[in-house]
Amino acid sequence: MEYQLIKLIHIISATILFGTGIGSAFYMFMANRKKDIHAMAFVVKTVVIADWIFTSPAIVIQLLSGLYMVHLAGYDLSWTWLKWGLILYFFAGICWLPVVYFQIRMEKMLDKAVKEKAPLPDLYWRFDFWWIMLGSLAFPAVMVIFYLMVMKPT
């Protein structure tokens, strides 16, 4: 029963993490392509809030619940599917940390541009480029993690 409860928590947190991540990415990407500063400011601010409320806790819950399930099930962390799952988890995290920094900086640039009725600095669009690149690396890593955790290939 304990394993099933932890598994449920793990699945719910994975759903929150993936859903919030893909939803935030979609809306921010689309708002930035439209180049409507007011819409961009609202979306980026909302994405930053969503990362604090949903994404960050889900990332922690994923690791802790996953490791606890490994312990409860008696799995060995040296098993290939677990090892690669953890490697990809940390890889995705390494991609996500700069993305959070970029989003916070982008939010501040947008806020300033709206208040001063000024154009965005070129730095905003460089951050946008790297935000897209890092997200494009993290997304397939998460998809492979899903595969590994469900299929547990030997």
Image: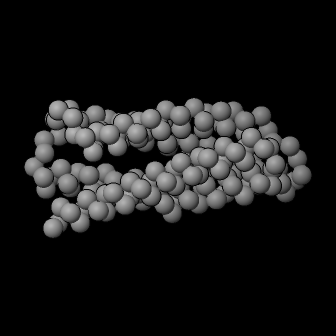
How far across and how far down the image is residue 13, in percent?
38, 58
Q: Quadrant of residue 60?
A: bottom left
> Between residues 117 and 14, which one lies in front from this camera angle?
14
Residue most toward the left?
74
> Between residues 79 and 121, which one lies in front from this camera angle?
79
**Type of colouring:** one colour
How far across and how far down the image is residue 31, in percent?
72, 48
Q: In this rendering, does residue 120 appear at all?
A: yes
Please give the name of the residue rendered at 59% of the width and 51% of the height, measured from the top-left corner: 24
Q: Quadrant of residue 130?
A: top right
How far across and how far down the image is residue 93, in percent?
43, 42
Horizontal arrangement in the rendering, residue 60 relative to residue 95 (left or right): left
Q: Quadrant of residue 29?
A: top right
Please give the name of the residue rendered at 77% of the width and 34% of the height, measured from the top-left corner: 122
Residue most toward the right?
117
Please give the name of the residue rendered at 69% of the width and 33% of the height, measured from the top-left corner: 126
Please give the name of the residue rendered at 13% of the width and 56% of the height, measured from the top-left corner: 72
The quarter in which the C terminus is drawn is: top left
In this rendering, the answer to whether 57 lies above or below 28 is below
Residue most toward the front?
151
Q: In this rendering, does residue 112 appear at all?
A: no
The quarter in which the N terminus is drawn is: bottom left
